[in-house]
Each structure stands twice: as structure tokens, then as C-alpha cells.
Image (tube, grey):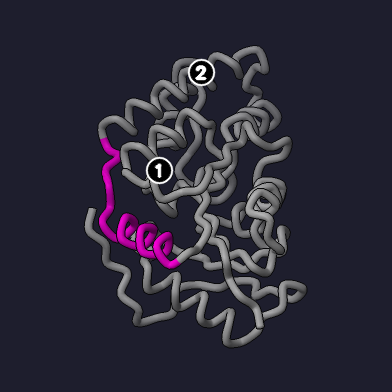
Amino acid sequence: MTKIKAIIFDMDGVLIDAKDWHYEALNQALELFGFKISRYDHLVTFDGLPTKKKLEMLSIEKGLPQGLHKFINHMKQIYTMEHVYMKCKPMFCHQYALSKLKNEGYGLALASNSVRVTIDMMMEKADLQKYLDFTLSNQDVTKSKPDPEIYQTAIKRFGLRPEECLVVEDNPNGVKAALASGAHLLKVETVNDVTYQNIKNRIKEIEESGLSVNNPPQDIKIPAGISTGGVR
């Protein structure tokens, strides 16, 4: 029987409602030079990718000068931190979920395409750092999501097999990375779906059904009718 021993969380859109912060911060930096990412392109193409990859794509598609990448990335991080300072707050449903899962003996980790300084600040502001065994940023791997490297690294660090791990993700790039790593998946729509009960329901489903890591489900979502309310 499959036994889940660790849960690995994405950050943006899962533990932190920061998708718009990254979008707005990057556009603030891009607009210094007359460039901008539309809301449609953000949701369809860029969501979940690291800033470095987004800038590379903009150079190819929109002619953004390569020489501006370093400065734009630097300014984007500054603007992102401003958003974090102003908007990032603890959510009770997340604090409750992680503390209870931790007490039950599950390994807990975070694996994000964000840079280390952003992860550390968001986890501190959200008051979640104390529940996590470790965090991984895009600076800890060679290839970012949708490549599975960051989840493979987390699984190895736990010393577990992929089928013993559950990944909580929200966007297509993260889902691809999670499934390619061989881990089980809980796909959520918003940060309010990340509750103790939803996570435990998914673990129960995996353990009772004996789902094979060699044939993982492609699109596991929160079942209809389950409350996703959270307290910010």
C-alpha cells in the first residue's frame, strides 16, 4: 500500500496569494523601458515561470534587449518585496494545516520558482517557515519548473521514493513538474483550497486506492462540494 510521508508545496498561488504581485512587479520594471506583459499573456503563457525565463521569452517575442535583463530582474525583485511588505499576511487555514500535518509526522517542504530572498520573506511574513523542514528556490536547481528537477531534489532530500510524496500545485508548469517527478499530485485552484481537510482527503484517496506512481492521475482537483474557505 502507498504511504504518503511528505508533502511538498509550491508557493505562489498555493501558500501565498502572490500571482498578481509578481505580475505587477515585473510590469513595473518593464514599463521603465516601454514594455509590458498583458494579463492574458501572463495567465496563458508566463504564469509559474521564473523571471529570468520570462525575460528570455520577451527578448525573443517582443525584442526586449538582452542587456536590460539584469537590471529589470533587479528592479522586479525590489518591487516584489514592496508588495510582500504591504500585502503578505498569515492565513489561519495554512497555519492550521501545516502545524497539524507537522504534528502528525509528515515531512513538509516548499519548492518554488521564486528566488531565495523572496521565499524567505514571504514565509516569514506568512508565519509558515517554522513548519517547513526546508525550502528550495530556483537558485537551488539548474532547471526551473516545468522541469521536474526541483521536486526530484526535494524528494531526494527527504530520502523518500516519489510515490511517498504528495505535491500541492496550482499552475500548468508546476503540475507538469510534479507529475514528471513521479510524485502524487493535489491540484488546487486558489490558496483557499490549501486546507488540512483537503490535503488529508487526497492522502486518504491515494493510500486507499493504491495509485501507482507509474500511472499518476493527470488532473486531480479539489472535489466539488468541499469548503475552501480560509481566514486571512
Q: Position of residue 116 (x, y in %)?
A: 52, 31
The single residue placed furthest to the right in the displayed view is 214
Q: Are marks 1 and 2 in contact (CB under 8 Å)?
A: no
Identify the residue shown where x is 65% and y is 71%: 218
**In-image side of 168 versus 157 (left or right):** left
From the image, give the main secondary structure of the stretch colored magenta. helix
Amino acid identity at mark 1: Gln
Identify the residue shown where x is 46% and y is 18%: 75
Pointer 1 residue: 129
**Is 129 situated above or below 229?**
above
Amino acid identity at mark 2: His
Q: Position of residue 7 (x, y in %)?
A: 53, 61
Q: Position of residue 132 (x, y in %)?
A: 46, 48
Counting residues from the start of the chain, the first of labels 1 and 2 encountered is 2
Q: Which mark is residue 74?
A: 2
Q: Secondary structure at mark 1?
A: helix
Instruction: Please give the range of residues in magenta.
Output: 87-104
**Is 167 situated above or below 46?**
below
Q: Residues within 10 Å of mark 2 (few under 14, many from 20)?
A: few
Identify the residue shown where x is 54% and y is 32%: 115
Identify the residue shown where x is 39% and y is 24%: 79
The single residue placed furthest to the bottom in the displayed view is 209
Q: Residues within 10 Å of mark 1 (few under 14, many from 20)?
A: some
